[in-house]
Each structure stands twice: as structure tokens, then as C-alpha cells.
Amino acid sequence: MYLIQYSDLMILLVLMLIVIVIIDIVSFKIPNFLVFIIAFFGLVGQLVFWGFEGLLDGGLGLVCGLLIFIPFYIKGCMGAGDVKLMAAIGCTLGIKITLFASLYTLIAGGFIALLWLAVGGELITQLRRYFLMSKTFICTRQMIYINPEDASISLKRFPYSLAIVSGTFIALFN
């Protein structure tokens, strides 16, 4: 019998993720030390509960989180903290659940972005803009990009940790 149970590790993960979301909403930053704590306890937990096979699974979860989200960082769609957070979550969850958490995160991010636009009063404007770009492509087979207006809410950031945590919770409790 271990001093801690696997459920204790999941409770720690959930509490850390809630703290990270609050910090990200307030400051648009995800503290590295909190991400490190999640990764450290995730890998240690994997090793303690499942041995070297678990440690490998946690390492693959880390790589999975990095590889899925790094292209979004490179394109400027999300911050490095978001990528590191998903990688740290992968340490705790392993590769299989991290794949599902990543998928649910991307879906949740889309819904949050639509809500962000709706609350900002720009949902219809942005949908028209994308409809026009799609229509142009269908009719001419040429891709065009229409920049949003300078003051558009679509140019402002939103705390993506909210989507990451939502996707992770869905994967965990599904």
C-alpha cells in the first residue's frame, strides 16, 4: 500500500489546473513552476504506480502534448505556457488520455473562441468574413485572407488554459 493513492494524484492535478486557470485569466501567464510541479508529480506518480512502463507512458504523454500543440505556438495561435501545460498534463495522464484531452481541448477552444466573439459582439462579423474567404476560394480556387479590423476582439488573446483544463476534465471524467 502506498502512502498516496492514484486518486490523490488526480486531485492534486485538478487543484493545480484550477489555480493555473485563475492565474491565466488574471495575468495571461502560466507560471512555469506550477507546470513543473504537475510534470514532476505526474512522472513520479507514473513511476510509483506503474513502474517503468508508466514512466514511459508519462514520457510519451509529454511528447504527445508537445507535438500536438507546438504548431499552434509556432503559428502564434497560443503561448508557450499553453504548450508546456499540455505537455505537463501528458506526464500525468499518459499518451492515450493525453490524445483525447488534446482533441477535447481543441474543440473546447473553438467553442470558447465563438463565445469570446459573441460576448464581444463580433460573431456575425467574423462569420461573414470567413464566409467571404470560403466563397472566394470555392469560386476562384484562390486562397485569400481578409484581415480583421484593427480594433477587432478577434485580435485579442483569451486565456487558453481554460480550454486546456476543460478538455482535460472531459477526458478525465468521461
Image (tube, rainbow, N blue to C red):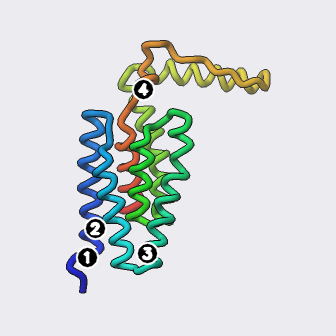
Closer to us: mark 3 or mark 2?
A: 3
Q: Residue at x 23, y 56 (%)?
A: 15
Q: Residue at x 43, y 72 (%)?
A: 55
Residue 167 horizontal side relative to residue 73, left or right: left
The reply to whether residue 174 is in sight is: no
Mark identifier at residue 54:
3
**Which three-letter amino acid code belongs to the residue tagged 2?**
Leu
**Splitting the image into 4 quarters, where does residue 21 fall?**
top left
Mark identifier at residue 117:
4
Query: Of callouts 3 and 2, which one flags the residue occurring earlier in the amino acid sequence?
Result: 2
Check whether the beta carbons of the residues at disc 3 and disc 2 lie within 8 A of each other. Answer: no
Q: Position of residue 13 (x, y in %)?
A: 29, 60
Check whether the beta carbons of the residues at disc 1 and disc 3 lie within 8 A of each other. Answer: no
Q: Residues within 10 Å of mark 2 (few under 14, many from 20)?
A: some
**Which three-letter amino acid code belongs to the residue tagged 3?**
Gly
Helix, strand or loop at label 2? It is helix
Q: Position of residue 165 (x, y in %)?
A: 35, 50
Mark 1 and mark 3: Cα distance apart in space: 15 Å
Who is closer to the viewer here, 100 or 71?
71
Who is closer to the viewer here, 150 or 119?
150
Determine which residue is flagged by label 2: 9
Determine which residue is flagged by label 1: 5
Helix, strand or loop at label 3? It is helix
Q: Position of residue 58 (x, y in %)?
A: 44, 67
Check whether the beta carbons of the residues at disc 1 and disc 2 lie within 8 A of each other. Answer: yes
Helix, strand or loop at label 1? It is loop
**Which three-letter amino acid code belongs to the residue tagged 4?**
Leu
Residue 156 horizontal side relative to residue 2, left or right: right
